[in-house]
Image (tube, rainbow, N blue to C red):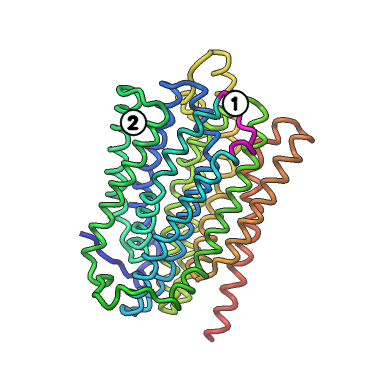
Amino acid sequence: MATVKNMTTGSPLKILFSFTLPLMVGNVFQQLYTLVDSLVVGRVLGLRALAAVGNGEWLNWLVLSLLQGFAQGFSIRLAQDFGADDKARLRRTYATSLALSVMCAAGILCFAFAALRPVLRLLHTPDEIFPITVTYLSVIFAGVPIVMAYNFLASVLRALGDSRTPLYAMIAASLCNIVLDLLFVIVFQWGVAGAAGATLIGQGISALICYGSLRKIEVIRLSGAERTFDREIAGRLLKLAMPFAFQNLVISVGGLVVQFVINGYGVVYIAGFTATNKLYGLLEIAAISYGFALTTYVGQNYGAAEIRRIRRGVRTGALMGIVTSVVIGVVMILFGRTIVGAFISGNPADAAAAAKIAYHYLCIVAAFLPVLYLLYIYRSSLQGLGDTVMPMVSGVAELVMRTLTILLLPALIGEEGLFWAEVLAWIGADVVLLTSYYVRMAEIGKRLQ
């Protein structure tokens, strides 16, 4: 049964650790089925199929990040209302955000299918992998309502302090996805469509588990009169969520620019980048989890006007993030060559070249992992304060840095410049986020004196 958790009292370290741990485990399982997808596609279907899935990665992330942006933006207000102990307003916010989520899913679904082929053509997707990429993304995009359902329901649970139910949901989804991956791709031989279908069925199971738990939480149980759409609350929710979604959109555009440049280097290069990008999820597992934890922690404490606790919690989260990222980075540098090699099969010469590209890229990313973790921690803290504008600005900084790097640096130092786009994008975002957080906290401190 789902349980809510008030984060306005107790040790910030214990609260963040206990809340983050289930999220990390859940994200491990989520990345596990992502890795199994890639392993099955790369080893069973070959280098072209792996390159095709990788070619659609940023467009897929663009659609997913829009869904996540709205869901997480809505959850900020839920966390603040819960921290303020305003149950009536919490229920009105929940009802309105639920209606908005349905509208957003419908709009994003139409956008995804309208953009699919034009964007892939714009990216100069190689002809030999174009139809495979279209097939894979068509199945994925058909499941937009399912993905929105899971992200919204999981965000509501986290806003109320429940990080365990999303964990159980993700474990169930992961196990289901792994089994169906093997069945659909190896036994039924449905190709990349089978891998995509397995992912969507897993997401559907996770959404049902979250929904079942939410129905048991008394504080958001809606009566007939409370199932109304409040326009005033909707405006406030969109004011929070729109910058959140736009932030993710501009980050995705930067990624598409990177994909455009990478596509010019051929299928082998695309496959090498894809292998590392699939591991990228493992690298940022803890960062995402710390981010979710701090958004909820800061949101609840801001609603309760506990400013000192916010400062303590963010400092604690930053330290936890730095230590975690260093450990993960070292592990990846030591064992990354073997890991990336597991994703790649085919012609020995091509496979070796792709693996070399993947490992070199992985080492650069792993060495600068603390920069990425600070990005998540300070961006999420600002969002918990209700500031989604400066995180949006940080997304623009990422876009500018990523685009300039990928377009200019290769001309100066050759192919080596391609590997630095992500790292320099993180650095650009961190400059904006750290400055904004400390300025914002100083303003809040003065206002409450």
Q: Which residues are magenta?
A: 120-128
Q: CA distance from mark 2 to mark 1?
A: 26 Å
Q: Residue furthest right?
A: 412
Residue 300, relative to residue 177: is it above or below? below
Q: Position of residue 74 (x, y in %)?
A: 43, 66
Three-letter amino acid code of the residue under disc 1: Asp
Q: Is residue 334 visible?
A: no
In-image side of 401 versus 130 (left or right): right
Who is closer to the viewer here, 97 or 359?
97
Three-letter amino acid code of the residue under disc 2: Asp
Q: Is residue 262 visible?
A: yes
Residue displayed at 44% across by 22% down: 45
Q: Position of residue 346 (x, y in %)?
A: 50, 16
Who is closer to the viewer here, 279 or 138?
138
Residue 338, relative to residue 324: is it above or below? above
Q: Which residue bears the numbered disc 1?
A: 127
Marks 2/1 in contact by CB < 8 Å: the verdict is no
Mark 1 falls on what kind of element?
loop
Residue 29, relative to residue 83: is it above or below? above
Q: Which residue bears the numbered disc 2?
A: 181
Residue displayed at 44% across by 44% down: 141
Which quarter of the rendering shows the N terminus?
bottom left
Mark 2 falls on what kind of element?
helix
Residue displayed at 35% across by 22% down: 189
Closer to the eye: label 2 or 1? 1
Residue displayed at 64% across by 48% down: 425
Q: Position of residue 400 (x, y in %)?
A: 69, 51
Who is closer to the viewer here, 26 or 244?
244
